[in-house]
Every structure is written in structure tokens, then in C-alpha cells.
Amino acid sequence: MNRLNAASLLLLLLLGQVAADEVLIIDGRTVRVDATTQIRIDDQVLPPGSPLPTKFGMRVEALTGQNALRGGDPIAQTVVFSYAMRGPITSIAPLRVLGQEVGLNASTESEGLPGGSFDNLVVGNHLDVSGYIDTNSSLLATFVEYAPEPIARWLLSGPVTAVDAGAQTADLGPQRISLAGVAMDNCGASLTVGAFVDIRANAITGFGANSVLNSITSLTCVAPMPLGTPGALGGLHGLVDEVLSPNSFRFGPYVVTWDAATEFRFGVADDLEPGADLEIDGVFGADLAFVAQGIQFNVPTIRLEGPVAPANVVTGPEGSVTVMGNTVHRIAQLRDEDDVYADGLATPRQVEVRGYLDRGNIRFATRARTRGAPDLTSSRVGGPVQSITGPVVTVLGVSLDTTGATFEGAAGEPITAQDFFAAVTPGAMVEQTGTYDPQTHRLSGGVMALILAAAAPPARASVAVAVGTLGDLNALFADGFE
């Protein structure tokens, strides 16, 4: 069902009609689908009664009625299952589709891969990719489907990074497109840098890494997320575009603000950086404002700072940096401020790496920078607690010895050791700065901070706009019996 054509529509009809409501679980939020709901896969409308796609991990947008409820769940007016890219692989290391780099982690769902592995893909294979597009023109993939036959109708979407009006070309990151003869929709007088575009194009034989996409059949400027009515509740999943102030950031078309009442999970405000993968609950305001009630990092954030030798850096698209025994891998959303991953180190340096711990326990970097000369006494480890044994808290495999340390609470206020250990359980977020001993793999002294206590998953309220990934799909009886 990744390429919707007459044959696939016929197959959908043959599979049978939906006799009752179905429920979608979108990032933990329940949305009902009934006979009145319009279902789309990208720009194609499914015939009424068609079964819903069961592509777990696929990006979904649901718009619901303000007061349309059944069994306590909102009934969707429209549901859009969407891809971000469809077309040929133009590079393997890194993985690129139509020139755009694709970030993969343990949360990425897949279907139909040769031998069941991304390792078996080759340049020229065709993929459908769903996920979240970063302002650096990369894609954090949530669902990838292998196309056994070449895709005839390509899709490319993302922010415009350059425009050459004289040459009639534009860039979406490394992918150049030809605007010659292209009628642009909803883009104003001309295409501008920063515009988010949805591009459809016919297949090009022999298309490669340096090819220009010159077969565009439609180019539309769109909002990267649906627009909510002021006052309505929304649940949005995406990547941080830009930090605007200590309590605001750009997120798709919205300026999101937060305050002391906003609940954070798996990270804190200091982790709100470009490329951060977030789920946000809140209220739509006027002029594309969004007030966050809850901000959840989709995976736990981590921070490491310590001495790094040149031999502990692997450069290139599949590069890594090993800090205090932790190998932190490059991903497409990385901001490599001092080109540590790109160029390596000429001499030992103090390196700070921020990122996340995925569901496969792999460390990925979203930011890297140097911090001067190596200094074991100014090391730092932050992340989710693995275990607690007496005064020692284990985080990212490092033993954080709190003997002689001072303690801080989430707001930076002094607390006692008793208060700290009363609040810390496995899963809590902590951070210690102190002296690292590479022989014992132990950090000691300094300051131990409780960043976030472990918390149960937040309750997901009914929302008017839900943007996220499909996590479950179950048929329900129309009368509410489950």
C-alpha cells in the first residue's frame, strides 16, 4: 500500500469493508475512525470503507471534532498517513533517498527489507520513508518500506535551503531541483529559503547522488504540521527547529512557549536544541503560538563531557566518538559545531557530546563540541539511572560515586543526600560533574544533580489535533464494547 494505484485500491476493497469503528493509537492518544472519517495516504483519498493501513511507526495526522466523542474518544474528521520521501537510494553511507539523509535508530520500523536488514540495501533500491524532517534537511525515519519494484511517482519534502532565481533551481539540503516550467502552488510570488515544500516528480532513469531533480509535476508550499484552532488542545510530534529564547522555540510552523508549570519527561529545558525529537501537549494560540503543558523527549537525553584522544574518534557518515567508555554514534540530526565527527581531533581534547539513548541502548549524538584541553577533573555524565548501590549511581555504564559530592534538586537548589536518594529510582534523570578515573570507570566528587524523578507515562487527553506515529490499531465494536 506504499504506492497507491488502481491495483492497490482494488485490493483494499477486496479486503473488506470496515464494519465498525476502529481506533488509532497515535503516540499514546486514542482517536476513533468511523464511516464519516476521510482517510488519506499522502495526497490520495481512500474509498469509504477501506481498511486502514497497519504500518506501525508511520507518521499520522488526525483532526478531530471539538465535541464528537464516542466511548470517551474523539472521532476523527480526517486522518492522513504520510511519507516524507519516496524514491531511489542515492547513497548508502550515509543512507540517502533523493539526496536527503535518513537517520535510523532502534525505534525505526521497517517492512520488506531484503533479508530483513538495512545492511542489504544498495544504491538504486527504492524506499518509502516516513518520519520527521529536520531543518538541516535530514529525516529522522520512523518507518521505512522497501519497494521491490521501482517507484514511478517520487516524493520529496522539506525546507528549501537555497534558491537561484537566475538558474531556476533550488536546493533542499544537498538535493538540487529544477524550477523550470514548474507551477508552484501556495508559495506566494516566488519560492523562498525556509519554505517547506511538498514535491511530486516522475521517475528519472539513472538518477544518482549528483543528479538534478528536473521531472517535477507539482510543487506545493505547505505547513509541516496541521494548523490548530486557537484554544484547541493539540498533541504534536516533531523536531525542534530553532531555540528562540530561554522559554520558547520554533517547532514546525509554531512558536512554542513553556513555563514553570510545564511538565518535562526524559529531558529538561536545557536539552531543547535543534533536532531534538519531542512530543508536546498544549494549547493552540493565535498567530501560530502554542503553549506547552507537557514536553516529552521521545527518547532519554544524555550528556557526556571528558577527555577524548584522536584514536577515540571515527570520522565519516558512520562515525563515532568514545567518551568515558561510551561510544556515541553520529546520526543525521547531528550538529557538529567543531567538526569533531567530520574531521576528528589532531590532539587530545575535552569533548562534550549531547544526544540520546535509543530503545536498543545505542548512544546517538545530536550535538558535539570541544571544551578546551583534556581535564579529568571537569568531567560530566548525565542520563537515566540504571541502578543504585549505596552511594553509587550507575548511568551510561559509569559509576557515579556521590561520596563527598554536593547535591542539587531539579531547579538547582541545594538538597541533602537523603532527599536525593529518596527521590532517585531507576529511570530517573541525573547528572554529575566531578573527576573521572578511567581505570575504575568511576566519576566522583563534584556536584550530583537530580534532573527529573522517574515518572509514570503521562495521561493522554483527547486533542483536536494529533500528530505522531502509529503505535497500534485495533477494531472496536461500534457500541463501545471492547
Image (tube, rainbow, N blue to C red):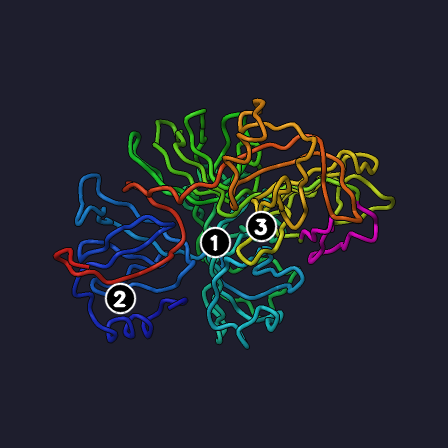
Is 2 or 181 nearer to us in this picture? 2
Residue 382 percent location from the top left of the image: 62, 40
Instruction: Please tell me whether residue 382 is drawn above or below residue 320 in the rendered image.
Output: above
Q: Is residue 201 visible?
A: no
The Cα–Cα distance between marks 2 and 1, rounded to whole angstroms, is 22 Å
Real-space CA distance between mark 1 and mark 3, rounded to the nearest whole angstrom: 18 Å
Q: Is residue 310 magenta?
A: yes
Question: Which residues are the magenta region?
Answer: 308-328
* Residue at disc 3, secondary structure: strand
Q: Which residue is at 43% across, 43% downward?
A: 279
Asked which quadrant contains residue 222, the reply is top left
> How far apart are the two marked residues, 2 and 3, measured between alpha carbons?
35 Å
- Where's residue 110, x and y in %? 48, 66
Could you tell me residue 324's position as x and y percent? 74, 47
Comparing marks 2 and 3, which lies closer to the viewer? 3
In the rendered structure, the answer to whether residue 309 lies left or right of residue 32 reads right
Q: Quadrant of the N terminus?
A: bottom left
Name the spot of residue 162 as percent of width and height, x first: 60, 43
To which residue does mark 2 refer? 51
Say left or right for 44 vs 165: left
For badge 3, the amino acid type reads Leu
Q: In this figure, which residue is indicated by the disc labeled 3? A: 357
**Residue type at tag 2:** Pro
Mark 1 lies on residue: 131
Q: Residues within 10 Å of mark 3 (few under 14, many from 20)?
A: many
